[in-house]
Amino acid sequence: MEPKSPEEKSGKYVYVFACHEDEQALCQLELRTLLGAEAVIGARYAVSAHKVEPSRSPFLKLRLDVAFEADSLTELASELETLTVRGATFKVVFAETDTAVSYDRQRSVERELGLGLRGKAEMRRPEQYFAVTELDSRWLFGECRYGEAVWLQHQSKPQNYSTALGTRLARAVVNIAVPEVAGTRVIDPCCGIGTVLVEAMSMGIDIVGYDINPLAVRGARVNLDHFGMPDVVQIADMRTLVPHSTALQGSPEPIYDALILDMPYNLCSVLPESEKLEKLQTARRLARRAVIITTEQMDPLLSEAGFHIDARCTVNKGNFSRQIIVCV
């Protein structure tokens, strides 16, 4: 067995994030789900024992894999004498957390620690990034990994609906529904043009999509093909995905681990209460965990469908609001 690296031994990761004030509740829910820890209210960071790829989240800017801790910068610099730089070049960056540190001080700390490392400092394209931060009067140092705005690349898709989820929101919803990627089977039974599918598949998630609208399915296929993703979409009314006989008998095991359902809400998709309930009952039988996106108050219907609300948040955009409801 190979020896563990310092950060693997510590099992401590510091994440720096940023979000708009309208997305604070969504950001908190996503980070709580992904990282298993509450972000400090009003802060720009979260500390977790979970190692998550920062590019998964639309809010995470970087991850600091804590390998060294010290009470002072001088003590930290002394500890770094044992550090081996893997690449030929490196860069040390200051990660801003809860302590106000001036620009000049940040650059001074980077230089002081960088001068003590064995290797060549490279500011533009280093082979290895390190980060340092001061948190709760302690100095932390380790490898750094930046998040990439993958969701931003997906905004330029050939097919769009005015009522479709934004790619940033869709990516956060996927993370809330699927915190653990490996071995998780997911379904989007009203997938529309495939915004959720694209975000999920870009993270390596095993997902399938259905929609009753042939035009929507065609648009989803065009979008998936545009990003080099396989066709995982079929035309179907989600209520037919569970055979009626099975529904009556009660399915002993849900088919999927997670489900994401964006309830229809525009003027052309007004559903009677009975049909909404049917959709939610089907969702309950299809998956162990569901994230329901709705513009309406649906708590009584969710309860009647057999769901327990585990968590929720509201996302506002101008005068328009969506509820993100996590159900089990």
Image (cartoon, rainbow, N blue to C red):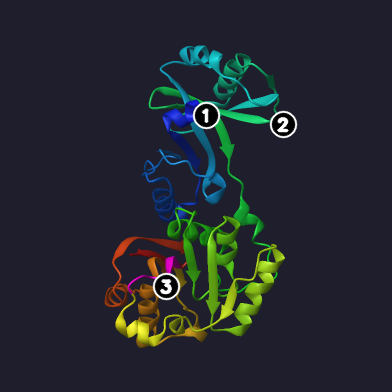
In the rendered image, which residue does mark 3 sit on? Answer: 295
In the rendered image, which residue does mark 1 sit on? Answer: 2
Disc 1 residue crowd, few under 14, some 14–19, many 20+, Cα 10 Å: few
In the rendered image, which residue does mark 2 sit on? Answer: 124
The label nearer to you, 1 versus 3, is 1
Task: Tell me residue 222's x, y (percent).
Answer: 69, 72
Type of residue at label 2?
A: Arg
Label 3 sits on a secondary structure element that is loop
Residue 165 at least partly seen:
no
Label 2 sits on a secondary structure element that is loop
Residue 254 at least partly seen:
yes
Q: Is residue 86 magenta?
A: no
Residue sitting at x 64%, y 30%: 128
Type of residue at label 3?
A: Thr
The magenta span reads 252-259
Relative horizontal placement of residue 74, taking residue 290 as reference (left or right) = right
Task: Tell me residue 207's x, y (percent).
Answer: 53, 65
Q: Specify the farthest residue to the front.
A: 1
Q: Which residue occupies the foreground of this view, 246 or 76?
A: 246
Task: Tell me residue 196's x, y (percent).
Answer: 54, 65
Type of residue at label 1?
A: Glu
Contact flag, marks 2 and 3 (Cβ < 8 Å): no
Q: Earlier in the sequence, mark 1 or mark 3?
A: 1
Relative horizontal placement of residue 231, taking residue 196 as reference (left or right) = right
Label 1 sits on a secondary structure element that is loop
What is the distance, in whole Å, between disc 1 and disc 3 at their CAs?
Answer: 51 Å
Q: Earlier in the sequence, mark 2 or mark 3?
A: 2
